[in-house]
Amino acid sequence: MLGVVTEKASPSIGDLLAMGLTVAITIGLFLVLGVLADDWAHTTPALTFVGLLVGVALAVLAVVVQVRKYL
């Protein structure tokens, strides 16, 4: 039916904590992988920045996927 507005559930505190942990773990993991790759390849800080950028991009993607169910 046109014009019918259905109310969607809002995220619980557990959902918000899961999103925060997802962001922290994803960014932290790829940052550490970038630092380790820099140590191995002797390219400091190039791969650290690459790891950081990949981690941020994946964290944003993960949060977007989690938030879409509430939109």
Image: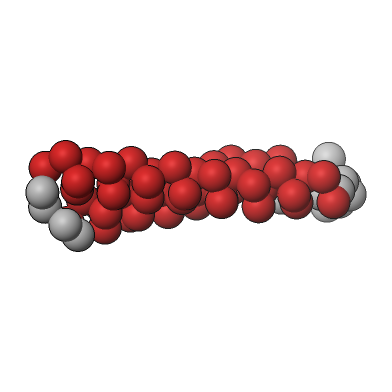
Q: Position of residue 40 (x, y in %)?
A: 16, 40
Residue at left offset 33%, top offset 55%: 53
Q: Is residue 70 visible?
A: no
Say which of 17 and 28 sits in front.
28
Residue at left offset 46%, top offset 50%: 27
Q: Position of residue 66 (x, y in %)?
A: 65, 42
In the rendered structure, the answer to whether residue 19 lies left or right of residue 64 reads: right
Q: Position of residue 23 (x, y in %)?
A: 56, 50
How are the residues colored? secondary structure
Residue at left offset 56%, top offset 51%: 24
Say which of 18 and 60 sits in front.
18
Say which of 62 and 21 sits in front.
21
Say which of 43 and 8 sits in front.
43
In the rendered structure, the answer to whether residue 21 lies left or right of residue 11 reads: left
In the rendered structure, the answer to whether residue 7 lies left or right of residue 61 reads: right
In the rendered structure, the answer to whether residue 16 lies left or right of residue 63 reads: right
Q: Position of residue 21 (x, y in %)?
A: 64, 47
Q: Is residue 46 visible?
A: yes
Residue at left offset 54%, top offset 44%: 25
Question: Which quadrant, please, contains the N terminus?
Answer: top right
- Count of numbered labels shown in the rendering: 0
